Image (spheres, grey):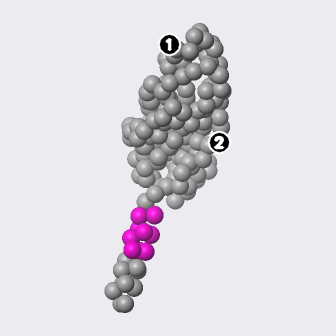
Amino acid sequence: MRNRGLIAVMVFAVAILFAGSVSAAPIVVESETDTLGATIITWEASFEDLDYTLGNPIVLTVNWIVVEGSATYDSFVLRSYTPKTKIDPAIGTDPVVAGNGDTSVTFEFLFSDLHYDEDYLVDIGNGHFKFFLMVDEDGDGTPETRAGFGVNIHVEDPQ
């Protein structure tokens, strides 16, 4: 009986230890819609995590809806991390695509350094990414044009 209690306490302690290393999921703060010929696409374009812990991985799933026409997933890239100050820039890792479907892409990255915002007394960083879809512009049902869609995330580490 004592062993079960000890095991339960150890499992609880390990769970707390690992829970501290996982950031809450970023929330969607803005969606955008674009029309490319015969296809209309709406996507989650802006995210924020106002309780980020420096160095913790961020797993982000970007969803889109093809309102009209057709489009298929092509690729995903990092555009930049900002602010890009000379003394105190925000720095992050290259995103790793963890999976994609017909209407979403999931990727993981982390900030290895954040910029200290003296006005608000908080460390901040922004990630700017782009996913590409093959889009049917002429309305024949076959996606033939590669188009990019911007995705941004703002993080703050209140320490």
Q: Residue furthest left?
A: 3
Report the residue at 52% width, 14% height from top: 142
Instruction: Answer with left or right where residue 138 lies relative to residue 20.
Output: right
- Where residue 42 appears, as percent x and y from the top left, is 63, 29
- Where residue 143 appears, as percent x and y from the top left, is 51, 16
Which label sits on residue 27? none
Q: CA distance from mark 2 to mark 1?
A: 31 Å
As drawn, 20 above or below 118 = below
Kind of residue sitting beneath label 1: Glu
As drawn, 6 above or below 49 = below
Report the residue at 65% width, 42% height from top: 29
Magenta segment's dominant SS is helix
The residue range painted magenta reads 11-19
Return the disc, 2 or 1, that comes first in the chain's sequence.
Answer: 2
- Category of crowding for the residue at label 2, using alpha-carbon neighbours closer than 10 angstroms: few (below 14), some (14–19), many (at least 20): few
Q: Which residue is nearer to you in this view: 91 or 42?
A: 42
Badges 2 and 1: C-beta atoms under 8 Å apart?
Answer: no
Q: Quadrant of the N terminus?
A: bottom left
Report the residue at 39% width, 70% height from top: 14
Find numbered disc 1 in the image and state the secondary structure of the residue it sits on: loop
- Where residue 58 appears, as percent x and y from the top left, is 46, 48
- Category of crowding for the residue at label 1, using alpha-carbon neighbours closer than 10 angstroms: few (below 14), some (14–19), many (at least 20): some
Which label sits on residue 29? 2
Residue on which the image places disc 1: 144
Find numbered disc 2 in the image and state the secondary structure of the residue it sits on: strand
Q: Is residue 95 visible?
A: no
Kind of residue sitting beneath label 2: Val
Instruction: Answer with left or right where residue 106 lies relative to residue 27.
Output: left
Instruction: Answer with left or right where residue 7 lies relative to residue 82.
Output: left
- Where residue 133 appears, as percent x and y from the top left, is 50, 23
Q: Which residue is nearer to you in this view: 36 or 86?
A: 36
